[in-house]
Amino acid sequence: MTYKVEHAGRTNSSFDDYKYKIFEDGRLVAEYWHDYRGDDHGIKFVNGKEENGPLGRMVDFLEGGGPQPLVLSLKAITYLNKVLHETA
């Protein structure tokens, strides 16, 4: 399973949330967001499940940005694998 994260944009206000689409093997699986300071963050899966503050901090979920490519952290990948592929 390969994950990819893409910036999904925001409106014109500098105080709006940053939004990201998360794809697994080319298929959209979730949307991740964080506030402009990175203090508040959450994820909404395509199946409707939502969670605020996954992994504790935004910097524990996303890495890179600026001149570096934006990627999911190893912790985020482990979290996504667990949530998306947990068996009942």
Image (cartoon, rainbow, N blue to C red):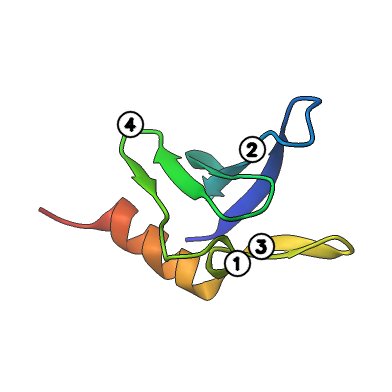
Which mark is first along the chain, 2 or 1? 2
Q: Position of residue 30 (x, y in %)?
A: 47, 41
Q: Nearer the viewer, mark 4 or mark 1?
A: 1
Which mark is first along the chain, 3 or 2? 2
Residue to which mark 4 is pinned: 48
Q: Nearer the viewer, residue 11 or 3?
A: 11
Q: In the figure, 18 relative to 87: above or below?
A: above
Q: Position of residue 88 (x, y in %)?
A: 10, 53
Which mark is first along the chain, 3 or 1? 1
Q: In the figure, 35 relative to 86: above or below?
A: above
Mark 1 → mark 2, Cα distance in angstroms: 15 Å
Q: In the figure, 61 relative to 14: above or below?
A: below
* Residue kind at label 3, given as amino acid type: Val
Residue to which mark 2 is pinned: 17
The circle on residue 59 is: 1
Q: Secondary structure at mark 1?
A: helix
Say whether marks 1 and 3 touch (CB < 8 Å).
Answer: no
Quarter of image, res 16: top right
Say whether marks 4 and 1 touch (CB < 8 Å).
Answer: no
* Residue kind at label 4, given as amino acid type: Gly
Residue to which mark 3 is pinned: 71
Left/right of residue 59 with respect to residue 31 in the rendered view: right
Left/right of residue 26 with respect to residue 49 in the rendered view: right
What residue is shown at x 85% (from left), y 60% (from top)?
66
Q: Nearer the viewer, mark 4 or mark 2?
A: 2
Which mark is first along the chain, 1 or 4? 4
Q: Nearer the viewer, mark 2 or mark 3?
A: 2
Q: Secondary structure at mark 4?
A: loop
Mark 2 → mark 3, Cα distance in angstroms: 18 Å
Say whether marks 1 and 2 touch (CB < 8 Å).
Answer: no
